[in-house]
Image: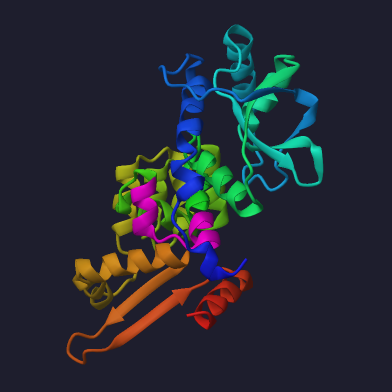
Amino acid sequence: MARGSEKRGLGRGLSALMADIEPDEKQATNGTAPDSGNTRAERVIPVEQISPNPHQPRRHFAQTALEELAASIQEKGIIQPLIVRPDPADQSRFQIVAGERRWRAAQIAQLHELPVIVRDFDDTEVLEVAIIENIQRADLNAVEEAQGYRQLMDRFGHTQEHLAQAMGKSRSHLANTLRLLQLPEEIQIMLREGSLSAGHGRALITADSPLDLARRAVKDGLSVREVEKAAKAPKPGQTSARRAKRAEKDADTRMLESDLSAALGMGVVIDHDTDAGGGKLSIKYKDLGQLDDLLRLLNTT
């Protein structure tokens, strides 16, 4: 699909489907029925005729959470129908667009049929809905949330401003969440596993040695405030001139660095010389794959 055609609003992917997706959060987290206004199922399909989306962005489903949802389903049934489409490879079957957790939990609960809403989505729309559903999940960790935002921006050309408005998030929340993807992979694993919070992750972004500080935070149980303080502390041997230079960088420049870093998914440093009127912009990539992405971006603008 041409890039130009991908740059569209969050139409069918969000506004037409969020009413179908959001109530699942409530059932998934506490097993209670949502308020009136449920989306009605169009039909009931045998569970063996339904297959998961092979391109589902989320691969990990916690077994404990699935068993809890299965218990809720055994008691109350499937409150919110799954959204499916005819399987492109076999029109006698159906592929999940939204609701794979319900499908998995229903099998644990030994249900034989599931209520569904059938929609005729193409592959691009299916991916967009799958990403949106994941972002809206209550138990999504900060790194998964950031990866969801990044996919929506990279694959569909959505800007931070438009995405923040459509998702009901502040632009600063979006930018700060995306910045977590700049952290080393080991720290991202700590965030996924819950060893560190999103607040810890944001504090680590400005540290000179984020991985060392992250390991110390986990080992010593440092609070977010303590990590923030440690990240701002000068390293031993750091010259007073360098400390002064870091301190004098104005808020607008730091915000611009943050915005560019979030947009590119890479570390960006701006050194502006007020007297000369010019300066230097540095982009830090973590591997050759990121460098290829940057070069591809530069070649298309």
Predominant SS of the magenta segment: helix
Identified at 57% across, 9% down, the residue is 76
Residue at 34% in and 64% down? 258
Give the residue at x 63% y 23%.
66
Residue 297 shown left or right of residue 64 in the figure: left
In the image, residue 168 sits, relative to residue 276, either above or below, namely above
Q: Is residue 198 above or below residue 210?
A: above
Q: Which image quadrant for residue 180?
A: bottom left
How is the model colour-coded? rainbow
- Residue 87: give x, y in percent of width and height: 75, 41
Q: Position of residue 183 (x, y in %)?
A: 48, 57
Considering only vertical position in the picture, is 21 above or below 269?
A: above
Instruction: Place residue 106 in its image quadrant.
Output: top right
Q: Is residue 181 above or below residue 5?
A: above
**In front of the other: 7 or 117:** 117
The quarter of the rendered structure image containing the N terminus is bottom right
What range of the chain is rendered magenta?
150-166
Quick check: can you spot residue 77?
A: yes
In screen coordinates, is 66 left or right of 270?
Answer: right
Q: Nearer the viewer, residue 292 or 89?
A: 89
Based on the picture, tell me whether residue 274 belongs to the magenta stretch: no
Give how far across and how far down residue 62 sits, in percent.
Answer: 63, 30
Q: Residue furthest top?
A: 75
Q: Position of residue 114 (x, y in %)?
A: 68, 21
Question: Toward the viewer: 173 or 248?
Answer: 173
Residue 158 on the magenta span: yes
